Image (spheres, helix red, strand yellow):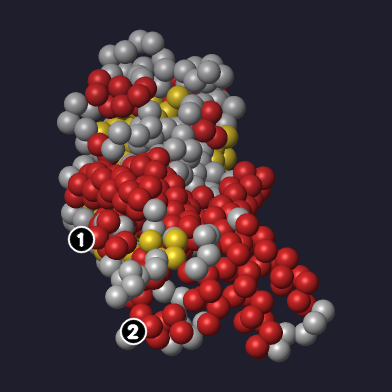
Amino acid sequence: MTTHAIEARRVPRWAQFSALALALAAAAVASYLTVTHYSDPASLACPDTGVVNCTLVTTSSWSVFLGVPVAVLGLAWSLVMVGLTLPRSWRTASVALDRARLAASSLGVVAVVYLVYVELFRIGAICLWCTAVHVLAVCLFGMVLAARAVARPHVPAPV
Amino acid sequence: MSKSTNRRVPSGRRTTSTQSAMSTGSTSRGRSGRDRTGTGPSAQPAAAGLKGFRSRHPVVSALVPVALVLAVLATMVIVKVTSGSSAPALAASRLAGGGTVPAVDPGITALAPGVAAALEVPAATLDNVGSPSSVVAPSRTGENQILRGTDGKPVVTYIGAEYCPYCAAERWSIAVALSRFGTFSNLSGTHSASNDVYPNTQTLSFYGSQYSSPYLDFEPVEEATNQVVGNSYATLQRPTAAESDLLARFDAGGSIPFLDIGNTYVVIGASYSPQVLAGLSQSQIAGQLANPSSPVAQAIDGAANEITAAITQVTGEQPTSIANSPAIASIAKSLGA
């Protein structure tokens, strides 16, 4: 059993709150995309006459993955990340939670790479709001990695 | 107990906790770990250097995966930009007009062999078909100012959607008519929605096509695919402001198909019943275009003649070979030319 756990370390508060802020921002944008997906995709506040064309992206056949709208998947992912980056979660001494945080943020980045590929090479248009979520996901991934790197060793008080 | 165990296994880790920062502790862990695993002496300096860098710059080291991700994304963008558009190009006139970007349309397929060539129906066949009574003629808009593109040529605007069975029918006639004035390329095959009236009517799509003509510009807009998304169809293209204005002026109900011929004539809805095409493949439809007695030719070619006659009215009766042909000259009179 590996022992490289974050449980014996303390993540600085700035890293905790930065990660949470990024996750909340991603959840907010993903919520907006989800709402417009189910109401009126054309109502997205986004230009749609050039390379940037949110409607073309969000209504394309690629906007649904395994029967689930990508916007919904993005919202679900960002909510999971919100839960994993709450201060309480950072304080929890659990190897599993640390791994889940790393895995979830990695999954987000993998999804970003796939979705950017689809936008560039399959649809031929870029969705600004989707790109916002992509940027936040990459930043969140970086923040999770940085938080693990700067986590200070925690010395339990002598009993 | 568990914490004790966790700290015990990598013995060096206990050492780190007594030091002020992670840096020196990491180095110490690395060395002791390497020594135990039997890494060769030659690898030790490099490994130690790497460990040292990681120790001195833990955040930078941790962000290497992020840098790799950014490199992948940047590579994709560069490949996309430098390779040009590998996606189907839109009609040139539409690109020039600042239309939507090329994209892959999941609703289209390659046109069946021979269909594109069959759109160039012999003039004698078209004259023979004439103007069947079952075909609806274009309506005059009452406008006197012919809509022209930046190149000065009259503009023919089509607004439809791939799911729409009436658009499926009308596209055949539009393509036959326009093929007399110019040349299409990159036409695709498609069909109307399977859950609408006249389901799966076989047709062609103007999406991604190009059209060139010395007499006119053609601006097609396929608003949606035949792919169901939610309770609607996936958006494909959106009319420009000018095209929307045409729709608002001459087609208040927003019905499609909508065909505007130089602002002077419009066709709203299909010029004939899509029922004529029921059960026929693209090849079967195309194969009947040159047979003036077939119901398909009567419908498609007849509607094409109506459109052709209207077009000649905005091209200044050019080319004369078409404008002066018996069928077109006759129809042009009835159009109120």
In the drawing, does residue B2 fall left or right of residue B217?
Answer: left
**Nearest to viewer (mark 1 / mark 2):** 2
Disc marking residue B2: 2
Res. A40 image quadrant: top left
In the rendered view, tell whether residue B1 sits above or below residue B84. below
Q: Residues within 10 Å of mark 2 (few under 14, many from 20)?
A: few
Q: Nearer the viewer, residue A133 or A5?
A: A5
Estimate the x, y position of residue A6 in percent, counting from the top left: 40, 69
Residue at x 44%, y 80% (from the top left corner): B7
In the displayed structure image, the side of residue B39 where residue B200 appears, left or right: left
**Of the residues shown, which amino acid type is indicated by label 1?**
Asn
Q: Secondary structure at mark 1?
A: loop
Marking on residue B195: 1
| Mark 2: amino acid | Ser
Residue positioned 20% across, 47% down in the render: A35
For residue A117, above or below residue B319: below
- Residue at point 36% right, 66% down? A101
Q: Quadrant of residue B262?
A: top left
